[in-house]
Image (spheres, rainbow, N blue to C red):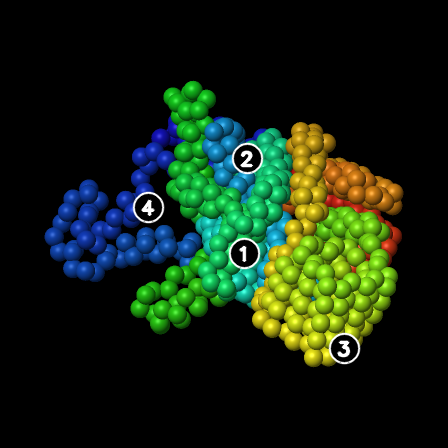
Amino acid sequence: GGRETNQVSDDYRYQDGNYEGYAPNDGYYRGGDEPTHEEDAQSDVTEGHDEDDEVYEGEYQGIPHPDDIKAKQKKQAPAVDDEYRDRADLMAERMEDEEQLAHQYENIIEECGHGRFQWTLFFVLGLALMADGVELFVVGFVLPSAEKDMCLSSSNKGMLGLIVYLGMMVGAVMLGGLADKLGRKKCLIISLAINAAFAFLSSFVQGYGFFLFCRLISGLGIGGSLPIVFAYFSEFLSREKRGEHLSWLCMFWMIGGIFASAMAWSIIPHYGWGFSMGTKYHFHSWRVFVLVCSLPCIASLVALKFMPESPRFLLEMGKHDEAWMILKQVHDTNMRAKGEPERVFTVSYIKTPKQVDEFIEIQSSTGTWYQRWLVRITTTFKQVWDNVLYCLTAQYRMNTLILAVVWFTMALSYYGLIVWFPDMIRYLQEEAYESRVKIFDEEEVSHFTFNFTLENQIHRNGEYRNDKFIGMKFKEVRFEDSLFEECYFEDVTSSETFFENCTIISTVFFNTDLYKHKFIDCRFINSTFMSEKEGCHLDFEEDNDFLIYLVSFLGSLSVLPGNIISALLMDKIGRIKMIGGSMLISAVCCFFLFFGNSESAMIGWQCLFCGASIAAWNALDVITVELYPTDKRATAFGILNGLCKFGAILGNSIFASFVGITKVVPILLASSALVGGGLLALRLPETRDQVLM
């Protein structure tokens, strides 16, 4: 037993020589056949023993021997003392234990190697990250169709676009905090299950309010997955592999954007891909698209059931045996894949930090069931809140504040410009479309049947007598100061069509969507509206739909070079230089937007900006994981990612309001935010040579 202990200690002694060995009572779990405390504590109360270990009569009377009482009290003394020790002393002891564990765990992960297990987990967590990328694109792609299918006003469209970010902001903070208390795997399953369930449900609901609620809860679920994914995967990586492979993992966000763009282009334009049940329930192609976009989340959720919990988290919780079994599983899986199944996992004990805050389980006989659950929930959230406050203690305050500014400035500029680019492209298209408008003055038409589409026209001072408008469509048509006398409109659909200051005499409107609000300052004399169309109708497929999908596809694909470069250089040039350099280059790209006066120029600058900024995002993910200890890692990541989504909400709102007004404000705001955040990031500590605390 002694030889085995010495051998293992030699394998995992610290490089600086401060921890050469440990006494038997140092808190280590020890393998082998060493006697346990239960065996040592067999009392003479049940059977009397003399000094020669012979049983004698008269001692088993239920009354312990005085010597046994003293020995028992001596054994119990340290445990009792811990209850009255100063909390600062207990925390100092725990921090010392965590430092020892960090170095030993790094050696254990290196022994386990990097192989099949990590790559399997890589793809499982990659699907979860892909689902996060898809979620950001879904609403933007379905809005043009959903606004007519659910009769959305401009304010409703704006709220639908922002509600996903709001849900992701709340989910990141809440579920990220819970992951440090309940476990990475458990909370990630909860997160993905919420997203999958409500994303699936949102494709079937008809009303705007319920759809908005489903997208909010769906965003809350997927928002919680991001901090958990990076914390989870980092705890299976060694120091040499961490920066590179976390950067490779970020590529799945790009894949999510490509998947969403391809599915939108393949599904949404096919309006007939759906079904109807009566006149009230319609399942159109955009709902099929929403359904398909939930598949990555469902796939990740199923695969995650076969993956283990993070052993580093289990060790922080004092669950040594479970952690040891998982690490052995990682080792054996990788060794079998390398063709070395005979290699033995040599670790027999792992340091576990001192448990300061222990959750006290309530007995089933205490109170009612909801009282017990209420106590559990409030206790858990109090622990989460304590973790949040811990990120602002003196040790981490400066790093947290700097990271908060960098995350916020990056999100404000990136998400603001990502929305601004397609809006500017639409604005340029509308300008070109309006420049081709046809104007008809003082035309007189009588006894004519219109059964074709009128598009992009203005009719002024016209007179229409005894005309029929049957089975036709109006698109971007305006009638100004015109006269309609004894005309007949039947089965007419319209888009952006208005009648201004017109006189309408003895005219019948049957089964049309020419509602009263489309007649501005008009006079009706003996005119009748019969059987108006109900609801909203997708009457025209937008010609620029394909271009919008192509812009999003190219924007997602353009980050591929940045992802590859950041992954290969992350561990060579460091996280800090990567963040600062990427943000400064992105700021320079913003200034070139002043020369983007065409659709092709805007698309080109968007691709360049996305490709330059992705390296900063990847480095931010890596350094946020490495700066915080295991029991605070997901909480800190969740707080910063929640702040990132708040910056996205502000960026979307501010930048969109300047479309068609000026380009100066969005460009200057984005570039100045990037420069300020990039320079401030240089004050963060470098973490590439640091073990995971």
Give the residue at x 79% y 70%. 483
Give the residue at x 38% y 21%. 342
Q: Is residue 635 visible?
A: no
In this picture, is 453 found above or below 464?
above
Q: Nearer the viewer, mark 4 or mark 3?
A: 3
Tag 2 residue: 237
Q: Amino acid at mark 4?
A: His
For marks 2 and 1, give the CA distance: 30 Å
In-image side of 579 versus 139 (left or right): right
In-image side of 474 versus 123 (left or right): right
Tag 1 residue: 218
Tag 3 residue: 523
Sooner in the amino-acid sequence: mark 4 or mark 3: 4
Q: Amino acid at mark 1?
A: Ser
Q: Nearer the viewer, mark 2 or mark 1?
A: 1
Give the residue at x 36% y 52%. 75
Sooner in the amino-acid sequence: mark 2 or mark 4: 4
